[in-house]
Amino acid sequence: MKSIRRRLTVGLLCVFTALLGGGGILIYFSTRAALLAQIDARLRIEALAVVKQTQQEQDDDGEGGNKKVQGSTSEAQPSRELEVRFTETYMPEFQGGGAEYFQVWSPDGQTVQRSRSLVDANLPRLSGPVDHPAFWTFTLPNGLAARAVGMSFVPPTAPNESKGHDPNFTATLVVASGLGQLNKTLLALRGVLFGVGGLGLLAILLVVPETLRRGLSPLRRVSDHAMKLEAANLRLNFPTKDMPVELQPICLRLNELLSRLQKSFDRERCFSADVAHELRTPIAELRALAEVSLRWPQSESARVEAFEDGLAIARQMESVVVSLLTITRCEAGHQTIQREEINLAKWIEDRWRPFATQAKAQKLVVNFDIPPGELIQTDPALAGVILTNLFSNAVCYTPQGGTVLIQLQKAGNESTLKVTNSIDGFLCKDLSMLFERFWRKDTARTSSEHSGLGLALSKACSEILGLQLTASLDNHHLSLSVKFKTDARKFS
């Protein structure tokens, strides 16, 4: 099982390890470079000090100075020699047994002077100009690492020299220093870095899981809260006040989902109660008819009347069941649709004809505003269910002497069929319940002619046909509107 906490722990440990390792490597090499730079600066100063003690002079008798070596020059000038006025008192670091070394070569490659610490060994002869000397690291004959600086220079002429200065008389100087102390310092630094890094990783290993546990505690609270949810307590909303900003939208969406689920469960409970209520009465009537017929013998005409009553009750029950099945098929998208092209005006006229007698009996004022020749592509059966229920609702719930208006409003290739009727006792808050299954106003609740499924069935049929069925209330007039697309062609 994948764990966010485990993945975050491993990821953070890897990141911190990389940061500590990278930081340690950076510190180590930057410190090493800084120490080498200090050594190079010191070596350069020492080399310049030796350069200051070196001079060239004419070779007259082969004597004089602390150390003289003859060097070849051009034919146009007399032979010159190199003299290094080096004293161990002036530069004691080059005494024997130390870790400082130097060696001077004449232009012809002969050693003029070397430090006592070298004994008979030689340093590598590499050099660069005085302003840009060569620096390198090498291994001494004794196997120890050392750092060296090499420079080529033209020694100045001795003060008592009467002849001219030879600018081509180039000497070479190499000054070296053992890196034993540097290596010890770097070894200690490595030990410190490894120690600090190890302690840091140990601290991170202890702190990160606890920090993540506390940081992810809101998720655990959400999980614990979700485990408490059941169908009976969906109103137990997720807390949002103390939740982190990242979890608040999730909790809000979950609360909205729970609210919708609660409403759905409430509707299902109400639906079950309504179905039981609607079927209980006709079933009780059928039972009463059967018991009466069995207990008290009846005449032939009475038995026929009883059978007719039973048939009417059965048809009423069948109507309820068929309506429920149609609503279920439409909501599930399983209802078959067979579209045909129909004449809207004639189709409305045919659907209104069964209600004309009842409207006349109630003295209703019925007006039509339907332009002729409009064509629509739809399923005649399902669309007929919609119109039949709209007309039935208008006729049955309009008070005696009221008005009914059936009109078609066009806007481009869209048309809206609106059925408006005057109504008493209907409030704006009732609009939200108008398309609910088995919902009826209390004044019509006891009527056996209406089951409260008509408008719910019309809504389901409208949605599967891609139509829009809406309701509005204006000044005690209820309007039920169906919006659909019409064909641009007309009937001739």
Image: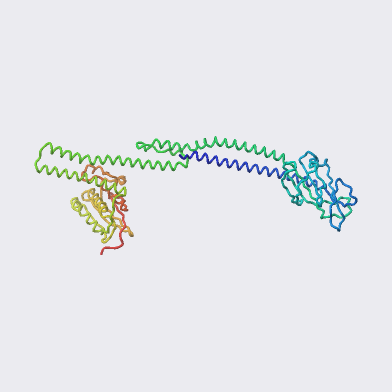
Q: Nearer the viewer, residue 225 or 415?
A: 225
The x, y position of residue 8, in whole percent, is 51, 40
Above or below, comparing residue 77 to residue 179 in the picture: below
Q: Quadrant of residue 91?
A: top right
Quadrant location of the C terminus in the rendered image: bottom left
Above or below, comparing residue 462 to residue 12 in the picture: below
Q: Quadrant of residue 318?
A: top left
Q: Nearer the viewer, residue 204 or 181?
A: 181
Q: Nearer the viewer, residue 395 or 332?
A: 332
Residue farthest right in this picture: 61
Above or below, comparing residue 94 to residue 358 in the picture: above
| 376 with respect to 258 (left or right) | left
Colour approach in the figure: rainbow
- Residue drawn at 60 percent across, 43 percent down: 22
| 161 with respect to 255 (left or right) | right
- Residue drawn at 23 percent across, 48 percent down: 397
Q: Quadrant of residue 45?
A: top right
| 167 with respect to 144 (left or right) | right
Quadrant location of the N terminus in the rendered image: top left
| 45 with respect to 292 (left or right) | right
Number of numbered callouts drawn = 0
- Residue drawn at 47 percent across, 42 percent down: 246
The x, y position of residue 63, in whole percent, is 89, 48
The x, y position of residue 228, in whole percent, is 39, 35
Residue farthest left in this picture: 299
The x, y position of residue 222, in whole percent, is 43, 38
